[in-house]
Amino acid sequence: MKKKIIHLSSFENLGVLHTAFKSLFTLLNRNFDEIVIVNIDNLKIFKKKKFNYYDPKIKKKFPKKVRFFNPKNFREFQAKLDFKNSVLINNINATFDKYKILRFLKKMNVPQIAIANIGNIQGSVFYYMKKNYRYYLQMFTIYFPKKLAVILSSIGFFSKIDIRFTSNKKLLDNFEKNKKKFLKRPSIYKEMILVKSKAFDNFKKQKLNEEYITLLDFEPDYREMVESTGKLSQTDIDKHYINSIIFLKKIKKIFNKKIVICIHPKYDLKKISKIYNEFEVKQFKTKYFIERSFIVLFYDSSAIVDAIVNKKKIISLKSDLYKGKKNMADTIRDIIPFKSMNISNTKGLPNRDIIIKQLNNKINLYDNYLNDFGAKNLDEIGTQKIIDIIKLRYFKKKDNNSLSKK
């Protein structure tokens, strides 16, 4: 019988999925007979009238065994997808619009796992949002349904997720401590397993040419941010980009390095390329350019973990556009106090040697972060360990039964 992996995702997130879990899909392709990515957009309770669909070319980036299934409804989902001998990767947020999906999975009784060995810590929107009506709306539509889903899984209305794979030691420790308490906090997970961060997958210590300064850009009017925090003034956004360009030109002059701007897979490449028309703007090649960077600049990006793993010089950027607000990246800056620069005020930048000395001093702080949140000390590659555990827990017994029958 074929060994199948089912992955739930919005097709709008295919670019993000491939970028974040490229090594995972490579290993899934080698170890299992079929991998199915299921589009959940038509299965949500509150469906969008119009989807901002992905570039179809994204599909070609996935390994050959990966197929894509876009069910129109739950009837088609159940009729055309065989859940037998399958393991389902469930990384979807348990918001109200996904409740019907979670209930369906309970009825299908399919084993579920969550893969979260990112190695990054990001605050939710509640970390930096002002307490206005949008804040309380987000509390009701995002925070509350997640907490309610935990309770509903505890009483059996939803399935619990069998295993959450994480590289966050502190999260695992809290989970294990809670299990020993007489009055335990409910959890949607039956078990957590520590694995090395995916940022260490295919990590090589070879020295590459550090010919770039890479900016991990943060789009202030990105659709999902606007939905969460409200639309920022276009005048302020324009000023932010003007300041950013001025800052990049000064940094380029100081270090005599080529500037490359890497953007999130869901950002508008044409729009950002037009704004930064004096620089190269790249999509889906963030890891490549980080590995070849002399300095990495960032506002807020999970990709910064790749820069930390590669022991790159890192500058955390601030902008008056976000003045008076906490940024999601503040969560990681609380642990690694990166050198910070404000693009809105570039007068009196230190000289090259002073900046380099300051940045090199920060690199010594990376290991503590990587140990706590990236499980750096583990020997086995995290993604390979996930594959091994899936095969052992869910397929080995069935393989042995098949052999015994023969």
Image (tube, grey):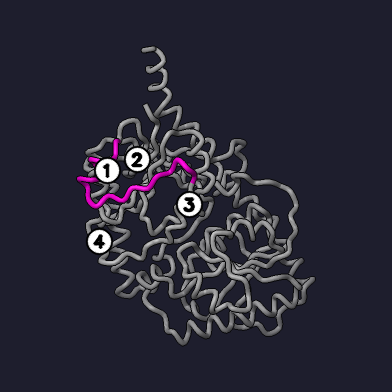
Q: Nearer the viewer, mark 2 or mark 3?
A: 3
Q: Nearer the viewer, residue 162 or 176?
A: 162
Give the residue displayed 27% in from the left and 46% down from the top: 102
Name the image quarter holding residue 357.
Answer: bottom right
The residue identified by callout 4 is 47
Instruction: Give the alpha-carbon distance from disc 1 to disc 2, as whole Å.
Output: 9 Å
Amino acid type indicated by mark 3: Lys
N-term-proximal mark, 1 vs 4: 4
At label 4, counting other C-alpha atoms closer than 10 Å, the crowd grade (few under 14, some 14-19, many 20 or more) is few
At label 1, counting other C-alpha atoms closer than 10 Å, the crowd grade (few under 14, some 14-19, many 20 or more) is many
Circles 4, 3 touching at the beta carbon (< 8 Å): no
Q: Nearer the viewer, residue 183 or 119?
A: 119
Amino acid type indicated by mark 4: Lys
In the picture, the quarter occupied by the C terminus is top left
Give the residue displayed 71% in from the left and 47% down from the top: 205
The residue identified by callout 1 is 153
Is 79 one of the magenta-colored residues?
yes
Instruction: Give the alpha-carbon distance from disc 2 to disc 3, as whole Å.
Output: 30 Å
N-term-proximal mark, 1 vs 2: 1
Q: Nearer the viewer, mark 4 or mark 3?
A: 3
Secondary structure type for disc 1: helix
Amino acid type indicated by mark 2: Ile
Q: Nearer the viewer, mark 1 or mark 2?
A: 2
> Is residue 366 visible from the viewing direction of this image?
yes
- Where does residue 76 sit, x and y in percent of width and height? 23, 45
Secondary structure type for disc 2: strand
Instruction: Give the alpha-carbon distance from disc 1 to disc 4, as whole Å.
Output: 24 Å
Secondary structure type for disc 4: loop
Give the number of the disc on residue 60.
3
At label 2, counting other C-alpha atoms closer than 10 Å, the crowd grade (few under 14, some 14-19, many 20 or more) is many
